[in-house]
Image (cartoon, helix red, strand yellow):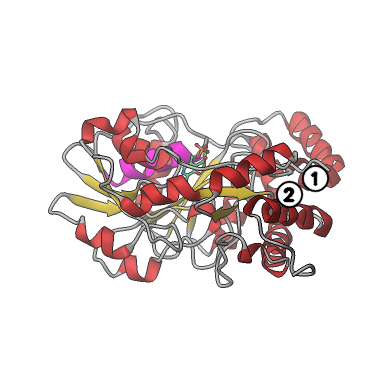
Amino acid sequence: MTIPLVDVHSQYEPLIPELEARFREVLDGGQFIRGPHFYAFQEEAAAYLGAKQAIGVANGTDALVLVLDAMEIGPGDEVICPAFTFYATAESIARRGATPVFADVDPVTLNIDPDAAAAKISSRTRAIMPVHLFGRPAALDELSQLGVPLIEDAAQAFGAPGVAQHGVFSTYSFFPTKNLFCLGDGGLVVSNDEDLADRLRVLAFHGSRDKVDFDFVGYNSRLDELQASFLRLFLTHLDEWNRGRREAAARYAELGLGDLVDLPLDEDGHIYHLFVCRSSARDRIREALVEAGIGTATYYVTPLHLQPAMRFLGNEPGSLPETERAAKENFSVPLWPTISVEQQERVVDVVRSAVGVVTRAGA
Ligand SMILES: Cc1ncc(COP(=O)(O)O)c(C=O)c1O
């Protein structure tokens, strides 16, 4: 039995007739940019997330750059962020000419450690950018007490509880494997600050309200009408998908995977964008999974502070010990909303034989 790491197709397959109908409707309407679905999705997403404003943009990376621009963060400013995250987090900061200042992660949650972030605050710090990594909410209560504005990189966490409530801005990606995804690139910015949200909305449209007068040097970054029409449909299924992910995560624990490797369990908030485990025997386990035809991946094996493009910051190996340990030990096992019990049993069996532990039944 081969098992993929994720199976997005199984999520949209039952919805294909409805997706086709939406495509047809957008074709008939002929409004491919800033049409009715674009505006309706912004309203529906804002209502779902409990935010006053939502702005559809071209992708999750643009979302971050636009946020930093709207907050006028640039050269001479510092933004504190984790190094154990997708590159776009720090890239957006550097793209604005500001300095990413990396803080270590908590070894259990793999999210930015509030104490480590506090230790990096300087007179130049303009924001902290926590990432809700793999769908697990960062320690927002603690972080929001540090007296520095938060920008939540929620690319991996659409629908996780408590997310997008503390940040001046929160950003999302709809890359096709995300919990809420579209069938191409897409992104969203949400905010409760009406003035900043208004500025961002204008920035994303060439710095203009009407394409006649241009108030800022802006961007052309919009969520396509077609993608917005798909996202409106997918949003109505998100709760059921996130529930399926949680049930699958709990089932891995029931099947005994936690006796073999460290599991990323968190009943309160995690929505398991990915199910990323840890083990000092990571490479052996991965080899066995690959050999058995089971999807697995590692994440951020070269953490951002050690990436070639970030060398100019002068960070040395060993400077973020928990980040570097997580980079060596993490690996994912298959998880999607409708993964079957048999598939999960097979994954656990293969991991069990890789770590050389006898089955409970045989013990
Ligand atoms: C944590 C994080 N931030 C930002 C991004 C960027 O999103 P996008 O790929 O839509 O530009 C991603 C997505 O891949 C991500 O995982």
Element carrying mark 2: helix
Q: Is residue 362 left or right of residue 181?
A: right
First to last magenta residue range: 60-72
Task: Give how far across and how far down residue 277 sits, in percent.
Answer: 56, 55
Residue 27 or residue 19, whichever sits in front = 19
Q: Which residue is mark 1?
A: 10
Task: Give how far across and how far down residue 137 sits, in percent.
Answer: 48, 62
Q: Residues within 10 Å of mark 1 (few under 14, many from 20)?
A: few
Element carrying mark 1: helix
Q: Which residue is mark 2?
A: 233
The residue drawn where x is 24% and y is 65% is: 147
Quick check: is 68 in the magenta stretch?
yes
| Amino acid type of the residue tagged 2 in the rendering | Leu
| Amino acid type of the residue tagged 1 in the rendering | Ser
Residue 10 or residue 70, whichever sits in front = 10
Quick check: 160 above or below 69? below
